[in-house]
Image: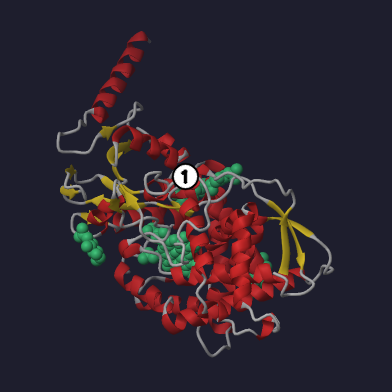
């Protein structure tokens, strides 16, 4: 018995040594393996990546390598050196890791698709004429849903809801109607999607187990059924975004099974950020009266006072510049958009930093940018980074403020909610337009206030760092009713 225990312990020791032997070479970034064999910092990383990486930044500076579940990840937090990673398509690979995540999360494998082709298809559909059609359609749907959701209530009656579910539900349904152009099961799709979205981080990290894994699988399957296109049943003359995407997949010889799984990926990509972003935007406005006042005043300037909203050209918002809105949205996303940009090192590489320092990266490691920690929350770039200042990105003359400095040097990227480089968000214009329309229509049609005037924004759910726009832990209770007159913004 003792002998067995001894042998086991020995075996364990050898394993630990085997996995811990990596040491830092002089020309490599600082190495921090953590004390748990193999896992390294995985637990801390998964629990609150922003806190963990900020701690590492304090300890090691703008670049360091950490061990996370057997992988060595070099984290780069100097915005002026980001290009060295973003521009490199030879030593660094973008799709390997992404494909693993897609397999784990959406059970999706599309080897025949060339990422550049898909990107081209997306870009075509989110710019120019297609974009303005989508924006117009989105506006109509937001307006209809806002009004039809109120239909069953007396006009002076207050309704109560959580701001997060209110925003997410409305923008999701409007986006779904716009891109998928189908009414059937709209609410069922939303409910199922939220269930899936709640399990997504665990799916993507590969830490999902037991009951939750079963729930996730069921949910994914159900969504696949709900989304599967009924191409024949449509009589309309023009093709929806979804149908067009479907045809693209067929052309690329993706099989039927994968086609329908890809639709879920597209649903997630196009719907998971706008709702939460609108929530934070309105949440910051409601808790910062000076910002709300400035925005309302800007919106009032856009509306001719004597016409009712129905008669406005829908693109009125697009035709005018809205510097206050733009700055407030940018500030909102600086606080709450937390993408992680990753690459895999496929050949040993020398990374040259903006300050001339060079570091060697090893083949097989990963490189990761996390703009949320720097530049977005970097106190050397943004004063009081935790404070919401709606006019942070405005000059005194109301022009866009885009010059920010660190150590006296101008930073190239001062906030990066949309990502950067070849994977930057394709839907940026569409998303900004949708949020602007939503906020505008909301403030025009509804009286909206917090149930508790002293309430604060709920804290951030720390488990979602790295997955785009963050979500709150809890919600902000609001009440709202239809306005008597529609101009009293
Ligand atoms: C506030 C809202 C949004 C934010 C903050 C946002 C942010 C992002 C970010 C950071 C990425 C890059 C992800 C990565 O590098 O892995 C991305 C990709 C993408 N986004 Fe958005 N997004 C938003 C809304 C939208 C909307 C409304 C659409 C479309 C309707 C959209 C379509 C896409 C697409 C198609 C991609 C993939 C691009 C590619 O893989 O090349 N996004 N988004
Ligand atoms: C990276 O590419 C961008 C745009 O293509 C360019 O402006 C920039 O100078 C490049 N930077 C480096 C370090 O190669
Ligand atoms: C935080 O997000 C995770 C992943 O989406 C979810 O499982 C968890 O329930 C959330 N926590 C709260 C309190 O909402
Ligand atoms: C869920 O699906 C994945 C992939 O198809 C599978 O590996 C896993 O075993 C399933 N989980 C459960 C609990 O059935
Ligand atoms: C849950 C639900 O409402 N399912 C419906 C979805 O739409 C199809 C047809 O469009 C119905 O048959 C389902 O009952």
Residue 71 image-quadrant placement: top left
Instruction: Estimate the x, y position of residue 101 in percent, counting from the top left.
Output: 39, 53
Q: Is residue 371 above or below residue 46?
A: below
Q: Is residue 339 left or right of residue 75?
A: right
What residue is drawn where x is 53% and y is 65%? 324
Residue 403, given in percent of the width and then of the height, sits at 35, 58
Whether the residue under disc 1 has CB within 8 Å of ligand 1 = no
Q: Position of residue 454 (x, y in %)?
A: 70, 46
Residue that appears at 36% across and 78% down:
251
In the rendered image, the residue lying farthest to the bottom is 237
Tell me: 71 left or right of 164: left
Residue 36's place in the image compared with 450, above or below, is: above
User: Is 157 located above or below residue 467 in the figure?
Assistant: below
The image quarter containing residue 144 is bottom right
Q: Quadrant of ligand 3?
A: top right
Task: Return the residue nearer the eye: 176 or 423.
Answer: 423
The residue labelled by disc 1 is 384
């Amino acid at each position: 018995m003792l002998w067995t225990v001894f042998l086991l312990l020995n075996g364990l020791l050898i394993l630990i040594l085997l996995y811990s032997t990596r040491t830092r070479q002089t020309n490599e970034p600082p190495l921090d393996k953590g004390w748990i064999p193999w896992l390294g910092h995985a637990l801390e990383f998964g629990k609150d990546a922003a806190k963990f990486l900020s701690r590492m930044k304090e300890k090691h500076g703008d670049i360091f390598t950490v061990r996370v579940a057997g992988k060595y990840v070099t984290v780069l937090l100097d915005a002026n050196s980001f290009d060295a990673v973003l521009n490199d398509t030879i030593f660094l690979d973008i799709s390997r890791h992404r494909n693993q995540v897609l397999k784990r999360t959406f059970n999706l494998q599309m080897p025949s698709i060339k990422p550049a082709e898909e990107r081209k298809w997306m870009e075509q559909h989110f710019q120019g004429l297609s974009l303005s059609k989508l924006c117009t359609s989105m506006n109509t749907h937001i307006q209809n849903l806002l009004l039809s959701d109120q239909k069953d209530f007396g006009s002076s009656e207050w309704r109560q809801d959580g701001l997060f579910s209110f925003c997410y539900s409305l923008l999701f349904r409007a986006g779904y109607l716009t891109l998928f152009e189908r009414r059937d099961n709209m609410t069922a799709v939303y409910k199922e999607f939220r269930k899936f979205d709640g399990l997504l981080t665990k799916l993507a990290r590969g830490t999902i187990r037991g009951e939750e894994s079963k729930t996730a699988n069921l949910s994914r399957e159900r969504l696949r059924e709900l989304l599967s296109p009924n191409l024949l049943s449509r009589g309309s003359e023009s093709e929806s975004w979804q149908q067009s995407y479907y045809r693209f997949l067929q052309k690329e010889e993706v099989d039927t099974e994968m086609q329908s799984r890809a639709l879920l990926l597209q649903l997630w990509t196009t719907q998971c950020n706008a709702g939460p972003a609108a929530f934070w935007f309105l949440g910051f406005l409601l808790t910062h009266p000076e910002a709300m006042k400035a925005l309302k005043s800007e919106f009032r300037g856009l509306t001719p006072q004597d016409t009712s909203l129905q008669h406005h050209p829908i693109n009125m918002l697009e035709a005018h510049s809205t510097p206050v809105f733009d700055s407030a949205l940018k500030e909102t996303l600086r606080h709450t958009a937390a993408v992680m940009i990753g690459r895999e090192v496929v050949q040993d590489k020398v990374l040259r930093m903006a300050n001339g320092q060079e570091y060697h990266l090893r083949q097989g490691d990963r490189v990761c940018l996390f703009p949320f920690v720097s530049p977005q929350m970097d106190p050397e770039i943004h004063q009081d980074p935790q404070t919401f200042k709606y006019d942070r990105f405005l000059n005194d003359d109301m022009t866009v403020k885009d010059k920010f400095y660190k150590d006296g040097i101008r930073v190239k990227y001062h906030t990066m909610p949309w990502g950067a480089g070849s994977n930057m968000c394709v839907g940026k214009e569409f998303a900004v337009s949708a949020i602007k329309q939503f906020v505008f229509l909301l403030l025009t049609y509804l009286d909206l206030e917090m149930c508790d005037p002293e309430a604060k924004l709920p804290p951030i759910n720390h488990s979602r760092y790295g997955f785009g726009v963050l979500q709150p832990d809890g919600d902000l209770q609001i009440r709202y009713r239809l306005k008597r007159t529609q101009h009293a913004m």
